[in-house]
Image (cartoon, grey):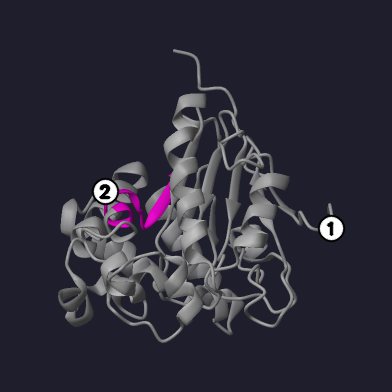
Amino acid sequence: SPPPPPRRVVSVGDLHGDYKHSALILQKMGLMGEDGSWIGGDVVFVQTGDVVDRGDESGPIFRALFRLQDEAPKAGGEVILLLGNHELMNMQGDFRYATPRDTASLQSPGGRSEAFAPDGWIGKRLRERGQAVALVGPERGVAAPVLYVHAGVIPEVAALVAKAVDPGAQGRQLAEALNRLSKEAFAADEKALRSSRDPLFSDEGPFWTRRLALGASEAAVCKDVDRSLAFFGASRMVVGHTAQEDGRVHQRCGGRFVLGDTLISEAYGGTSHPSAVELAADGALTAVYPATGE
């Protein structure tokens, strides 16, 4: 059978409760209409986690993203929602970065704990459809696969996942295994998640690690990046999580590790830096800044 036709692939980093700028990005990138409907056609849209906390309007962002995720398949599109450390924290009952206005925006009578519980309107959906990673490759018309993850996948975690399922697992099989193990770990309730010792939830897991983003030695970081990419058969890894202080998308290792958290939420310093990353069929990446038209 002929290979699938190339599709637009768009990713967006941490949104942190800033609905206004989340909507601006989705509209300017041609994904969401002014009425909130999916207008992206067959686009693959990846949000790399951390929708919640810091800002005041996580509720409207989750509603918008869930609607787009429901509507996109009818037009041949796809919305992939990755889980970030802040989604994990809220499911664990750690609300230290939550504002009272944000809690009100969730419109949950039982507050945050209820909203993020296994049967809460956010918690249920994230546990059912949230993913740890997305490997976007030939099946979506992209010749050189790209691994999307909130914080990063270090080689030790990739090896741990392979060992848990099949020592020879790699590529799509490994990505699916990591998502399956993540889903099983997230199935727990607030109390059990808080006391969990699951290595996926550790400081070096895919929701929290900063080793690849902040490692001082470029050579050591790139060695780790290349080992991880080899496990997944990927050409690049695209992450959010570690804020880029100048509001620009950055890369390490000749573009094999891409840092996409540009401080989109104005909750950080009063200024929003909207961005998205476009992936071309040949694997080339382009940073887009919707507010300025760059």
- The residues tagged by marks 1 and 2 sit, at their Cα atoms, a distance apart of 43 Å
- Number of other residues with Cα within 10 Å of mark 2, as a class: few under 14, some 14 to 19, many 20 or more: many
Up-down relation of residue 172 to residue 166 (above or below)? above
Mark 1 or 2, which is nearer the eye? Answer: 1
- Image coords of residue 37 (percent x, y): 56, 37
Q: Secondary structure at mark 1?
A: loop
Which residue position is annotated with label 2?
A: 169
The label number, if any, that marks residue 292 in the structure image: 1
Q: Quadrant of residue 82?
A: bottom left
Up-down relation of residue 45 to residue 50 (above or below)? above
The label number, if any, that marks residue 26 in the structure image: none
Up-down relation of residue 255 to residue 86 (above or below)? above
At a point 34% along the width and 65% down the height, the residue shown is 108
Of the 4 image quadrants, the one containing the N terminus is: top left
- Image coords of residue 63 (percent x, y): 46, 52
Q: Amino acid at mark 1?
A: Thr
| Boundaries of the magenta span | 125-138
Nearest the eye: 58 or 220:
58
Q: Secondary structure at mark 2?
A: loop
Nearest the eye: 64 or 84:
64
Nearest the eye: 47 or 250:
47
Q: Hey, which residue is sitting farthest front in the picture?
A: 109
- Image coords of residue 148 (percent x, y): 48, 54
